[in-house]
Amino acid sequence: MNRYIYHIGILIVVLFSSVRMAQEEGFSLSSIGLGEVKESPLHFYCSDSYELTFISNSDTRNTYPKRCEEVSNDAQWGFYCIKPYKYRNLITEEEFNSYPILCSDAILSVDTGHYCESAYKLFSLKKQKSFSTYPNICKKALTTAGRGYFCLSTYQLYSLESEGEHNTYPVPCNHL
């Protein structure tokens, strides 16, 4: 039994060492198209019960009515819930209404600049307006909305910048 634990330990050490060396060489899952690992752009600490402080410039933000510890996990992406249907931008301190979607569901994707208002409706924080994703469900549209578009059909995309539909034939929209 101890021999198996020893070998598993060795495998774990080798795996972590390999990952670290690959990262130092610039390798990532996204470089081979297997996904993207997001790293939090914001670094801060709770300096008081209702206050967080940015490490880079010592700016502080009031998190009231939520305690700093309650919002710190969500706030690392720049947004956090202050009420069931309301969230706040950590940088600008602007507040947004997410109704009818609960804030806790909406902020799961706000780091992309968008969230789903309903099954077929995408809200753009940049444009401050809603877009219909029909016939595709909104959660599917979120996968590309951060790049400025979402697919409506195999060869049809909707551009959030020009706010119009575009034909992608002969390239399928989901291959862009």
Image (tube, helix red, strand yellow):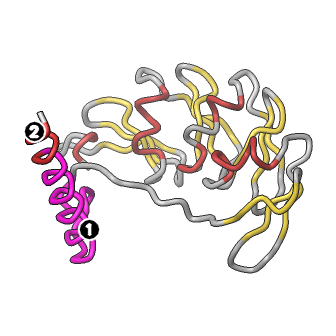
Residue beneath the point at 84% across and 44% down: 67
* In this rendering, position of residue 62 left or right of residue 2: right
Residue 134, x across and y down, in percent: 47, 23
Q: Can you identify the residue that label 1 sits on?
A: 20
Q: Secondary structure at mark 1?
A: helix
Tell me if label 1 and label 2 are in contact, CB under 8 Å. Answer: no
Q: Which residue occupies the foreground of this view, 92 or 170?
A: 92
Residue beneath the point at 14% across and 39% down: 2
Residue beneath the point at 18% across and 56% down: 15
- The extreme front residue here reads 2
Residue beneath the point at 62% across and 64% down: 42
For the magenta stretch, what is the residue range?
8-33
Residue 127, x across and y down, in percent: 67, 50
Q: Can you identify the residue that label 2 sits on?
A: 4
Q: Secondary structure at mark 2?
A: helix
Q: Is residue 23 magenta?
A: yes
Residue 57, x across and y down, in percent: 75, 80
63 lies above or below 134: below
Mark before the other along the chain sequence, 1 or 2: 2
Quadrant hosting residue 166 = top left
What kind of residue is marked 2? Tyr
75 lies above or below 158: below
Residue 155, x across and y down, in percent: 26, 36
Q: Is residue 87 magenta?
A: no
What kind of residue is marked 1? Arg
Q: Which residue occupies the foreground of this view, 109 or 165?
A: 109
Q: In the rendered picture of this protein, how many numbered marks are placed on residues?
A: 2
